[in-house]
Each structure stands twice: as C-alpha cells, then as structure tokens.
Amino acid sequence: MLMKCAPAVTGLAVVLLLVACGSDDENGGVRHDTGPTADVIDPCAACKAWQVCKNGACDFDVTSMWNIVALNGEVTEKNPVGESWDALGGLPDPFLCLTVASARKCTTAAQDTLKPNWNQMLHTNVGGGSLIGPAIKVEYYDDDLTTPDKICELSATLKLDFLDAGAFNLNCQQGMANVQLKYVK
Ligand SMILES: [Ca+2]
C-alpha cells in the first residue's frame, strides 16, 4: 500500500500521501487517481476569449471589444484608365478609410509608393455587434493636392472566420489592403 500510494516524491509529500492513503483503506483503497475524470466533457472548454457559452456551444460574444489596425497594402502601377497615378509617372500616395459603426477613420497617406505600410490603429474598442453584421465601408484613395483619386470603394461584411484569423484583406481591381482585428476584451 505504501509503495503504491507514494511514488517518487519528496519527504513532505510522502507524509501527506500517507495521510491520504490511510483514508483510502476505509473505502476499500481503490481511489488513487487525482486527475480529472473523463466522464464529463465541457462543450465550451474550447471557447475562445471572444466567445460565450450558449446552449452548450461556443457563440460569438457581441459585447466583445476589438481594435482595427490598417496594416499595409498594394496598389497597381496604373490607375483605372491606364495612366500613372500622379503626373509625370509619379507613384500614388495611398490611404485607407474604414467606416465602422458610423465612425469614419483614415490612415495618413503613404507617400509615393505602390506598397503602403500604414500600421495605424483606426478604431479602438469596437463592439463585436458592430463588427459582425453591419457592413464596413471601405474607401481606398490616392492622396492628391486637389481631390483624392479613388483606388476603390467597397462594402465589406466581416465573417467570424476573420476574427479567428485576426485579420482580413480587402481586394479590388486597383489594389488590396490588409487589416488586422485585435481582440481587446
Ligand atoms: Ca497622388
């Protein structure tokens, strides 16, 4: 009995185990496993931080909070009419605006580049309910002295998969952009 209940452990632990083993004898000495039992499987054990357990399944938590970061993008060399974006073969100055829950936020314009690298936080603490469901308005422009030239405008409906991936990309004829979704709480 002693050997069975006290595997390689230090002195103090042995003493404690001896006490525990003593009471085992009263129950027939069959209880010796302290690990969790496999009888009950929690269906929500694998729920992510932004999910709630609902009717025994993981469900999106509409009260979760998210930050939205415009990471980077790419723009085609020519504009929709086949010309360079700026005069005399100049490269574009791309910026991205995202309207979420009626708030329109834009990156600064990346100067003279086909590969803007903004890495700018546009929205903070956006409620999950505003992120999934309502479409996000996307405006992608080449900044100019007068009025910006449109690279593209579109409406994006986010999917739960995007939250899982923590990012999504926007694709249109004249360019693409990567946007990061960061779970806050
Ligand atoms: Ca420009």
Image (cartoon, rainbow, N blue to C red):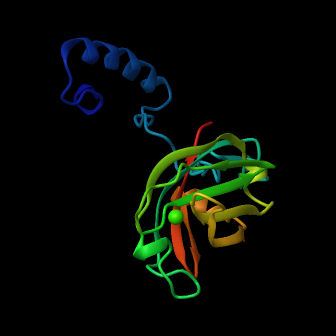
131 to the left or right of 20: right
150, above or below 121, in the image: below
- Return the x and y of residue 14 as percentages of the image width and height: 25, 18
From the top left corner, tell me how far across and down residue 56 is, in percent.
74, 53
| Residue at x-position 78% and y-position 51% | 130
* Quarter the C terminus occupies: top right
Give 150 or 176, whichever is nearer the viewer: 150
In the image, taking residue 25 as reference, residue 171 lies left or right, namely right
| Location of residue 147 by image quarter | bottom right
Q: Nearer the viewer, residue 90 or 162?
A: 90
Q: Residue at x 64, y 46 (%)?
A: 50
Q: Does residue 58 show up?
A: no
Residue 2 horizontal side relative to residue 80, left or right: left
Look at 47% across and 79% down and name the residue there. 84
Seen from the viewer's position, the closer of residues 62 and 151 is 151
Q: Residue 127: name its quadrant.
A: top right
Q: Quadrant of the N terminus?
A: top left
Q: Is residue 24 above or below residue 142?
A: above
